[in-house]
Amino acid sequence: MRERREEIMDAAVEIFACKGYYNTKIADIVEAVGIAKGTFYLYFKSKKALFLALIKKQRNFIEEGINLEKIVARSDDLKSFVKILIRDAFNIYAGNRDLTIVILRESVSVNEDFVGEFEIMDQERTERLKTAYEYLKEEGYIDLENDFEFFYYVFVGIIESILLRKLIMKEQELFDEEIVAKTANYIEKALTI
Amino acid sequence: MRERREEIMDAAVEIFACKGYYNTKIADIVEAVGIAKGTFYLYFKSKKALFLALIKKQRNFIEEGINLEKIVARSDDLKSFVKILIRDAFNIYAGNRDLTIVILRESVSVNEDFVGEFEIMDQERTERLKTAYEYLKEEGYIDLENDFEFFYYVFVGIIESILLRKLIMKEQELFDEEIVAKTANYIEKALTI
Amino acid sequence: MRERREEIMDAAVEIFACKGYYNTKIADIVEAVGIAKGTFYLYFKSKKALFLALIKKQRNFIEEGINLEKIVARSDDLKSFVKILIRDAFNIYAGNRDLTIVILRESVSVNEDFVGEFEIMDQERTERLKTAYEYLKEEGYIDLENDFEFFYYVFVGIIESILLRKLIMKEQELFDEEIVAKTANYIEKALTI
Amino acid sequence: MRERREEIMDAAVEIFACKGYYNTKIADIVEAVGIAKGTFYLYFKSKKALFLALIKKQRNFIEEGINLEKIVARSDDLKSFVKILIRDAFNIYAGNRDLTIVILRESVSVNEDFVGEFEIMDQERTERLKTAYEYLKEEGYIDLENDFEFFYYVFVGIIESILLRKLIMKEQELFDEEIVAKTANYIEKALTI
DNA sequence: TATGAATGAGGGTTCATTCAT
DNA sequence: TATGAATGAACCCTCATTCAT
């Protein structure tokens, strides 16, 4: 049954989002799912393996949800590019609210077991941003003076800051078009000479 | 002996920064300090109490290190205000690198026991930023359109993003004047119409 | 299907011989046989029952393979008697190498559940040796001074010592005629005045 | 406190001797000693580490208790040599009855974790026996025809057989001089042409 | 103030066994 | 007869905290 594995991951995500990785016990998860402890270990080798599966899941969501080529095709200036990118990103996050919270939180925290995975996630993000950055520079949308390092800080910083507040506040309408527009606007201004 | 308490906090900060709160054992801390386990509990009621003391310490550093009135007095436009504020902030963080790492990480993570404290820290920061925001608006440095929510996102997001990368990368020259200038520049642009 | 039961026992013996009773999981056995876990329990009430069946099997091998009356009929002095007995014994063991290893090992080890069975096995062996001992004494092949206790120690000790080394070393030609002759020779000397 | 460690080892040996390694729980041991579970782990890293310590202990007993040079000095023919050697060996075993049982049993059983240690023990025994064998051959006490392999089988087999029965039967007077004399006698006869 | 041996609740994991299909 | 997902008791081990010295 493939569903059971999903069920466990869903329950785990919810609890992890609420209590964090360390404060979540296997007992909590299996109770939430309504299965016995042993059953958990039919689907995951360990608590750690479960978490790694969650990281993988989020990576997949991002990989599937963010297609830079499409964004490029649809955009014709910095503002529209940023807007589309942010809209896509927010859609992924809003569609996986708890998972996003979990990954965001634990990636900042420290855990030897996951550090490697989170580094890979960050590298992938850096790659994506680098591609975007090169595109924007080539098109003349941003100036040569702009350095990638700060391009990254501005993008990642502002978005993560918003995520952290919005997701955790459990607001209903996370990311309506107004938020998207505003976010895009601020980022665009920061990146324009 | 007040020093012994400081000694413990210093050792704890160093280890927390490296291994995180949950992976740090009291045994690690007392070994680093060179005292017995029992001694630890003469100075701190519990591991939790130690961490709360660290949060308090960081709050004090910030409260002492950031004096908005002085910044206001020294600045005469948006750029100079932001620059001074950021320089002050970076000075505090660079001067307490490990503590900053610890607080930054654990504040994003979740722990029922500290959630309240971190909320207070965030409120204090919000107050400070609000004060700054009001000042800048009154002076006409930023436009009425600007809403505080995004003012906060831009400020906090960009700075925390930089902190996270710079502090953890263990770069030697964390925050030289060039970084300060650049950071101020990007933030200023984001906040200008 | 009687064969399925045999199949399980054969697979179990092989794994028990390699990993020991406690380190062998039902999962290992059913995987080796290529059946489902549930199927195992159609043929054996429990892991313990499986092992008891193996003990029984070895008892049968020995009972069928060692016929003292025949040995008596074929022998005409101590040396020939011992030689035939040992040849027969070694033939049984070499023909059921893994089973012999398993029984030998676990009989020395302790397990409440099997202690009774192993005691019966030992009693049967003691009976056989006693019969042999009486015969040899009657025939005047060994002297009255010889006490049965040591007769047993010499026989059982030397043979088990050889078994333990030879079986486990996985030598190809376990028990050729030379080994038989030598073993018989040493035992015979020990038992002769 | 060095005594506490000894206390745990003593209790463990007694229970291991009775129930075997796998059927002995840490809970059994700490209950016997009258300490809490956590205390056990102050003295031993794990159950496995405890057992390794027991193996080490037995190796030390043997190393201290069997001094071939002294035995050589005291003996003037095969019989006296064997007798002294056996007396010394039996003294060690009788003086550490339970430990001897435990080691004897588990060395025959299989456990990946200890296999290496038991191989070392066997090598040491083989060394000792080889030394004895060479000495006896040089002195002309045993004939050149005698091969070491069977010398080992006779010695080790007979003694272990006796040990297994005598120790486990919990007879009071394990190894009086009569047993020693008899054992020596049988072994000597087996090894004489 | 300082010690460090002792505690024991609690967590992750294993695995023989069951049972609905 | 055959399956294999599900079970849960039981086990090893950790670690924050205590307390007699």
Image: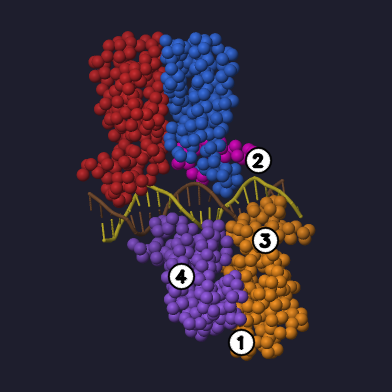
Chain colours: A blue, B red, C orange, D purple, E brown, F yellow
**A23 inside magenta stretch:** yes
Amino acid carrying label 4: it is Ile
User: Residue A1: which disc?
Assistant: 2
Q: Callout 3, which amino acid?
A: Val
Report the side of C102 relative to D134 (left or right): right
Residue at image coords 70%, 77%: C83
Q: How many residues crowd mark 1 within 10 Å: few (<14), some (14–19), many (20+)?
A: some
Asked if residue E14 lies left or right of residue A155, the reply is right
Q: CA distance from mark 1 to mark 2?
A: 74 Å
Badge number at residue B145: none
Q: Are marks 2 and 4 on the same chain?
A: no
Q: Residue at x 77, y 59 (%)?
A: C3
- The mark found on residue D62 in the picture is 4
Distance (Cα) linking label 3 and label 4:
34 Å
Rendered residue at 56%/16% (across/down)? A71
Q: CA distance from mark 2 to mark 3?
A: 33 Å
Of marks 3 and 1, the one in the foreground: 1
